[in-house]
Image (cartoon, rainbow, N blue to C red):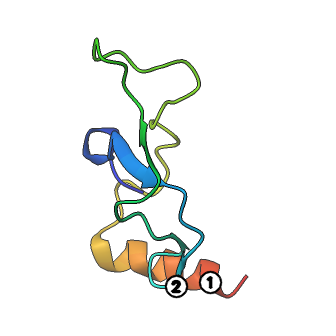
Amino acid sequence: MKNPQQRVSEFWVGSREFDPVNVGYVTHEGLSKFKVNASNGEIMPGNSNRGHSYGTSLNEEQKWQVIEYMKTL
């Protein structure tokens, strides 16, 4: 639910360890790094981190409330 400018452009993949707080996989240094951008700075086809813009105007507390709600589904 971050603005596109605030979204990470690279992260570690390969972990199967679940992060129950952030509701996803742990992304600390692992097997390989996933990069959204190519070496020329352009977004690689199929690797966009733009996603949707829903929730970007919510404050931090509201965003966490949405995450906590999603945990109940």
Under mark 1, the amino acid is Lys
Residue located beneath label 2 in the image: 20
Mark 1 lies on residue: 71
Q: How far across and how far down the image is residue 29, in percent?
A: 34, 60
- As drawn, which residue projects farthest toward the right? 73
Q: Within 10 Å of the Cα at label 1, are there few (<14), some (14-19), or many (20+) other Cα atoms?
A: few
Q: Residue at x 55, y 18 (%)?
A: 45
- Image location (x, y in percent) of residue 31: 47, 54
Q: Secondary structure at mark 1?
A: helix
Q: In the image, what residue type sits under mark 2?
A: Pro
Q: Is the C-beta separation of discs 2 and 1 under 8 Å? A: yes
Numbered label tally? 2
Residue situated in front as seen by the camera: 25 or 69: 25
Q: Residues within 10 Å of mark 2 (few under 14, many from 20)?
A: few
Q: Nearer the viewer, mark 2 or mark 1?
A: 2
| Residue 17, image x, y percentages | 55, 76
The image quadrant that residue 9 belongs to is top left
Which residue occupies 42% across, 59% down?
A: 30
Vertical relation: 18 (above or below) 9: below
**Element on which disc 2 rests:** loop
Measuring from the top left, give residue 10's x and y in whole percent: 35, 42
Is residue 58 shown above or below 47?
below
Q: Label 2 to label 1, Cα distance in Å?
A: 9 Å
- Closer to the chain start, of discs 2 and 1, is 2
